[in-house]
Amino acid sequence: MSRESSKSIFASYSVYPLIMHAVVQAVCEQTGISSPMNREEAEAVARLLKAVADPARLQLLSALSASPDGMACVCELTEAIGLSQPTVSHHLKILTSAGLLRREQRGSWAWYGIAEEGVEALRRALGHSLPRATFA
C-alpha cells in the first residue's frame, strides 16, 4: 500500500480532522480571531494544552482547586494523588512554568496554588467555561 493511499484511508476513517477543525474553530471564536493564529499565539496555546495533557497534572489542578485555603504543599499533594514526591514536584514545575500555578516558599516547604490568569488563558484556549478558582 502506498503512503498516499494509506493517508486517504486514514482520513476517511478518522475523526481527527473533524476534532482538529472543531478545536481550531472554538479557539478562534473565543479569542475573537477571524484568521489563523500567528505562530506566537499558537505556541502559547500549545504550551497550556501540553501542560494539562497528563492525568497527574489534571489531578493536581483538581486537588488544588478543592483545597480549603487554595494552597497546598507538596507533601499534601503526594498523598492526594498517590505519586512520589519527586514525580509530583516534576508535574508541579511543569504547571508552574506554564503559568497555571503559583509557587510560594514557606520555610523549607514549597506551597502551590492556582494562578487565575493562567487558568483564564486555558479557559479561553479551550473555548468553553471551566470552573473558576475561588482564590486570588
Image: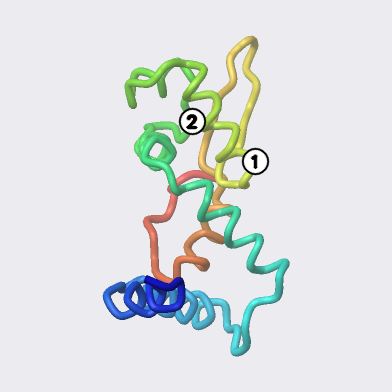
- Quarter of the figure with the C terminus: top right
Q: Up-down: is 93 above or below 41? A: above
Residue drawn at x 38%, y 80% as measured from the top left: 8
The three-letter amino acid code for the residue at tag 2 is Met
Picture quadrant where residue 109 is located: top right
Note whether 127 is above or below 34 in the view shown. Answer: above
Name the spot of residue 55 as percent of width and height, x first: 36, 40
Q: Earlier in the sequence, mark 1 or mark 2?
A: 2
Task: Point out which mark residue 71 bears.
Answer: 2
**Residue at mark 1:** 97
User: What element does badge 2 sit on?
Assistant: strand
Q: Residue at x 60, y 83 (%)?
A: 33
Badge 2: residue crowd in 10 Å (few <14, some 14–19, many ≥20)? many
Q: Quadrant of the N terminus?
A: bottom left
| Numbered badge on residue 28 | none
In this view, the mark in front (1 or 2): 1
Provide the secondary structure element on which disc 1 rests. Answer: helix
Percent x, y for residue 96?
Answer: 60, 38
What's the residue type where badge 1 is placed?
Ser
Q: Is residue 62 above or below residue 9?
A: above
- Residue 67 versus residue 42: which sits nearer the camera? 42
User: Residue 3: where, in percent of width, then height?
Assistant: 45, 71
Residue lying furthest front: 1
